[in-house]
């Protein structure tokens, strides 16, 4: 991932506040599953917050983002979960050039909706 970020120096990369929430949730799951100690999770969350503040544009989800996400969830064949539908809606509403994700299902759903999506690795 570091090489992927380094290759995009000078580009505007963005996430949403929802991404930070999901990251914190993932760290909590790892602590509960004994994969990380609480201190490690807190440090990882602090590093993510610093990365966001220093290097990323951070979008706050709007009412329009939630509305569009809800529309996507009505297309059951897309197989989207709420969080993924919100990521996709934010990318669409912010006219993102590409939605980067490691989630293959999200990539497939984005492409069905004519949104450029790719895996960073």
Image: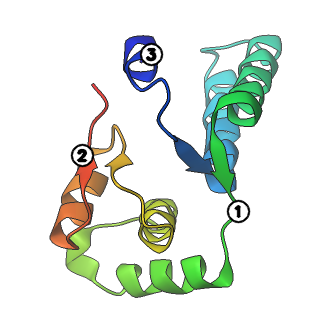
In the picture, measured across the screen, residue 24 lies left or right of residue 14, that is right
Q: Secondary structure at mark 3?
A: helix
**Of discs 2 and 1, which sits in the foreground?**
1
- Find disc 1 in the rendering and name its residue: 60
Which circle's residue, 1 or 3, is located before the other in the chain?
A: 3
- The image's colour scheme reads rainbow
In the picture, measured across the screen, residue 119 lies left or right of residue 83, that is left
Q: Is label 2 in contact with label 3 (beta carbons under 8 Å)?
A: no
Mark 1 Cα-neighbour bin, 10 Å: few <14, some 14–19, many ≥20: few
Q: Is residue 88 above or below residue 50?
A: below
Residue at image location 39% in from the left, 79% down from the top: 73
Q: Which of the pair 39/58 is nearer the observer?
A: 58
Q: Is label 2 in contact with label 1 (beta carbons under 8 Å)?
A: no
Q: Which of the pair 3/73 is nearer the observer?
A: 3
- Find disc 2 in the rendering and name its residue: 104
Q: From the top left corner, tell me how far across and down residue 86 is, in percent.
A: 51, 67
Q: Secondary structure at mark 1?
A: loop
Q: From the top left corner, tell me how far across and down residue 30 is, in percent.
A: 61, 25
Residue 40 got which mark? none
Q: Secondary structure at mark 2?
A: helix
Mark 3 Cα-neighbour bin, 10 Å: few <14, some 14–19, many ≥20: few
- Find disc 3 in the rendering and name its residue: 6
């Amino acid at each position: 991932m570091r090489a992927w970020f380094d290759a995009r120096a000078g580009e505007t990369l963005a996430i949403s506040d929802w991404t930070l929430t999901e990251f914190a949730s993932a760290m909590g799951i790892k602590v509960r599953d004994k994969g990380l100690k609480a201190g490690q999770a807190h440090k990882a969350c602090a590093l993510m917050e610093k990365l966001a503040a220093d290097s990323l544009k951070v979008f706050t989800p709007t009412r329009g983002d939630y509305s569009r996400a809800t529309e996507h969830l009505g297309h059951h064949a897309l197989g989207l979960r709420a969080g993924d539908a919100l990521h996709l809606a934010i990318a669409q509403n912010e006219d993102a050039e590409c939605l980067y994700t490691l989630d293959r299902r999200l990539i497939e759903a984005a492409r069905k909706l004519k949104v450029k999506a790719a895996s960073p690795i």
